[in-house]
Image (cartoon, grey):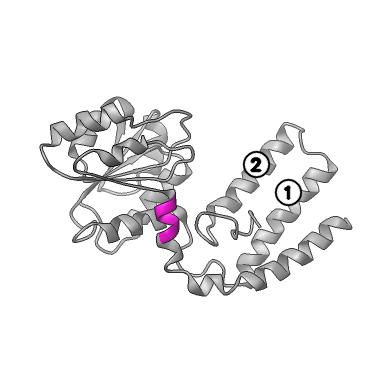
Amino acid sequence: EVAAGIDSPVLGEGEILRQVRHAAELARQEHTAGPVLGSLFRHAVEAGKRVRAETRIAQGTTSLAHAAVALADDHLKGGLAGRSVLIVGAGEMGTGFTKALAQSGNGPARIVVANRSAKRAAGIAGGSRTEVVSLSDLDEELGRADVVLTSTAAPELVLDLDRIERTMRSRRGRPLLVVDIAVPRDVDPAAAGVRGVSLLDVEDVRRFAESHMAARRSEIPVVRTVLAEELERYRFT
């Protein structure tokens, strides 16, 4: 169910299947997946691929990153057009944010990617509107951005309450929209109480995406049929 995308924040999303594939490859390299777990990984990946090929579970926008960008666009009066967007982190979600922004019809005027490794950030900066900065420049870029999209693998808060409060004092009343889809969170939830800050999280993105996915939800019984077949194959392999 995880690999197939029916146990994900966004129903049918594609990122989770790539993560399962990556986990399987790491387990193979580290010799931690024996015959039972190795077979389970293989069937899970095959089930995820079959589900996306044989059902409509992936119809429309199924990426969590794309859904986050769509939510930000919907949340702002006038959308993202002409805005300055700051992406924190250059991992898989950061790449997804960049691609989603590049594909948006009325995109932002400026996109900035902030990451510990400038080289990694440069690798996902795909257009003339995209700039790359170090995390040491984060405070300055927070002062300039209209929207912050963040999803890092950091074990601690990237944007704590103190940093958010300093940022908002420097902005002198300019509002800031922050969309945090990291698990665990990148942004202190208390930031939602700071004047001028609109903080959205992965649950907000999930609810937004669910409101647009009635067609995908109707495919769940078909997906479960495919998964039952793959489960039987796994049991008797």
Q: Residue furthest left?
A: 172
Work out which residue is located at the far top of the displayed protein and give it. Answer: 136
Q: Residues within 10 Å of mark 1 (few under 14, many from 20)?
A: many
Query: For mark 2, what is the residue?
Result: 23
- Mark 1, residue position: 41
What residue type is disc 1 on? Answer: Phe
Mark 1 to mark 2 CA distance (whole Å): 9 Å
Residue 122 located left or right of residue 44: left
**Which of the 4 image quarters holds residue 58?**
bottom right
x, y percent for residue 72: 30, 55
From the viewer's side, name the closer residue of 130 and 68.
68
Q: Main secondary structure of the magenta part?
A: helix
The residue nearer to you, when weighing 227 against 125, is: 227
183 and 106: which is toward the camera: 183
Residue shown at the point (63%, 59%) measured from the top left:
4
The residue at 47%/69% (across/down) is 213
Horizontal and vertical percent position of residue 168: 18, 35
Residue 216 in picture, x, y percent from top left: 53, 70
Q: Residues within 10 Å of mark 2 (few under 14, many from 20)?
A: few
Residue 138 visible? The answer is no
Q: Is residue 170 above or below residue 49?
A: above
Q: Secondary structure at mark 2?
A: helix
Tell me what residue is drawn at x 73 percent, y 38 percent: 28
Percent coordinates x, y for residue 31 in the rendering: 77, 33
Residue 131 falls within the magenta-colored stretch: no
Left or right of 37, for residue 152:
left
Classify mark 1: helix, strand or loop.
helix
Magenta region? 203-207
Question: Which amino acid does the dot numbered 2 rest on?
Answer: Ala
- State which tag comes first along the sequence, 1 or 2: 2
